[in-house]
C-alpha cells in the first residue's frame, strides 16, 4: 500500500484524506439534524424503532448502572434505557455533533428523563476515565467514525471489567432476494426521499454508500475480538439489514 493510500479512508464510495472525513461527516449531520427523526421513520417504515427497542431489551441493564451512549444523536437509545437504570443510575448521551446532541438533550428533557446527561465527545478520543461504565452503546454511529479501531479501543478502555458493549449498525443482507430489493430501494428511493424531505440528496446518498462500505457481520466481529473483547456475538435484524454486536470486557 502506498503512503497516500494509508492516509485515505472512504466517505461513502469516495476516497478521501483521513483528515477530511470528520468535517464531511459533521456536514452530513448538521444538514440532516432537523429532519433526522422523521427521515428515520420514513426510510425504515418505523422498523428502526424495533431494532433500537430490541437492543435495549437485550442489554440486561439494571437499576444503578452507568451507561455511555456514543454517537447518541437525538437520543433514541438513551431515552429507551433511561428507566432501566433508574434514578440511581445514569446515562451519558454523547455525540461529536453539537446540533444532534442539542436535539437529543431537548427530547430527553421533554420526556422527563432526568438521569440523561449530555456530553460532546468523539468516539475516537472519549473524554472519560478508564473502567467507568457498565455498558457502552453505539447505534448507527460506528459506520461514520474515521478510525473504527481507535473507537473500539476507547470503548474497551472506558468499560468496567465485566462491562458490555452493544453496537447496532447497518450490516450485510443475508438473503439474495431481499438484498436485490433492498439495493433498488436504497439507491433509487432513499436519496430522493432525502431530497424531498430535507432538501439534501447527497447526505442520503452518503448514507446508502457508507452502509455498503461497512465490514460485514463476521469481519466486524473480528475487529471487536482483536481489540480484546470476549464473548463477541451478533444477531441479524431484518435479514441482516442491521446487526447487533454484543461484546464483553473481562
Ligand atoms: N444513535 C443515534 C440513532 O441511532 O438514532 C444517532 C445515529 S446517527 C446515524 C450517527 C451519529 O454519529 C451522528 O449524530 C453523528 O454526529 C455521530 N458521529 C459521527 N462521528 C462521530 C464520532 N467520531 N464520535 C462521536 N459521534 C460521531
Image (cartoon, helix red, strand yellow):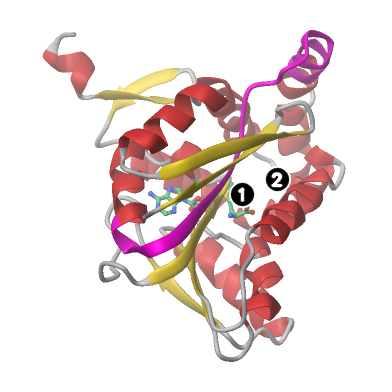
Q: Is residue 147 placed above or below 214 in the rendered structure?
A: below
Q: Is residue 10 placed above or below 68 in the rendered structure?
A: above
Residue 199 place in picture, x, y as percent: 69, 41
In the foreground, 184 or 130:
130
Q: Which residue is mark 1?
A: 32
Determine the secondary structure under disc 2.
helix
Residue lying furthest left = 3
State yes or no: discs 1 and 2 in contact (Cβ < 8 Å): yes
Marks 1 and 2 sit apart, C-alpha to C-alpha, by 7 Å
> Magenta region: which residues?
157-183
Residue 160 place in picture, x, y as percent: 36, 66
Residue 100 visible at all? yes
Relative placement, left or right, of 180 versus 131 is right
**Magenta-colored stretch includes residue 187:** no
Q: Residue at x 54, y 71 (%)?
A: 102
Task: Classify residue 152 by image quadrant.
Answer: top left
Q: Which part of the image, by quadrant, shows the N terminus? A: top left
Beta carbon at label 1 within 8 Å of ligand 1: no
Q: Which residue is mark 2?
A: 198
Residue 186 place in picture, x, y as percent: 73, 23
Task: Classify residue 225 by image quadrant.
Answer: top left
Q: Which part of the image, by quadrant, shows the C terminus? A: bottom left
Q: How many marks?
A: 2
Q: Residue at x 56, y 27 (%)?
A: 217
Q: Residue at x 67, y 71 (%)?
A: 79
Amino acid at each position: 500500500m502506498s503512503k497516500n493510500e494509508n492516509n485515505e479512508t472512504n466517505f461513502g464510495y469516495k476516497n478521501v484524506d483521513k483528515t477530511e472525513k470528520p468535517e464531511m461527516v459533521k456536514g452530513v449531520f448538521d444538514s440532516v439534524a432537523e429532519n433526522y427523526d422523521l427521515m428515520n421513520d420514513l426510510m425504515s417504515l418505523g422498523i428502526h424503532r424495533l431494532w433500537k427497542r430490541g437492543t435495549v431489551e437485550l442489554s440486561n441493564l439494571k437499576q444503578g448502572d452507568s451507561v455511555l451512549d456514543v454517537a447518541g444523536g437525538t437520543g433514541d437509545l438513551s431515552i429507551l434505557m433511561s428507566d432501566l437504570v433508574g434514578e440511581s443510575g445514569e446515562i451519558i448521551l454523547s455525540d461529536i455533533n453539537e446540533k444532534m446532541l442539542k436535539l437529543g438533550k431537548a427530547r430527553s428533557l421533554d420526556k422527563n428523563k432526568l438521569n440523561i446527561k449530555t456530553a460532546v465527545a468523539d468516539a475516537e478520543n472519549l473524554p472519560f476515565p478508564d473502567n467507568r461504565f457498565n455498558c457502552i452503546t453505539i447505534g448507527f454511529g460506528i459506520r461514520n467514525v474515521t478510525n473504527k479501531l481507535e473507537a473500539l479501543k476507547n470503548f474497551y478502555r472506558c468499560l468496567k471489567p465485566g462491562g458490555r458493549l452493544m453496537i447496532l449498525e447497518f450490516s450485510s443482507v443475508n438473503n439474495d432476494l431481499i438484498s436485490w430489493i433492498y439495493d433498488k430501494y436504497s439507491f433509487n428511493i432513499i436519496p430522493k426521499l432525502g431530497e424531498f424531505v430535507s432538501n439534501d440528496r447527497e447526505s442520503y446518498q452518503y448514507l446508502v454508500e457508507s452502509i455498503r462500505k461497512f465490514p460485514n457481520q463476521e469481519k466486524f466481529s473480528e475487529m471487536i475480538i482483536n481489540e480484546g473483547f470476549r464473548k463477541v456475538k451478533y444477531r441479524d435484524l431484518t435479514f441482516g439489514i442491521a446487526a447487533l454486536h454484543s461484546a464483553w470486557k473481562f
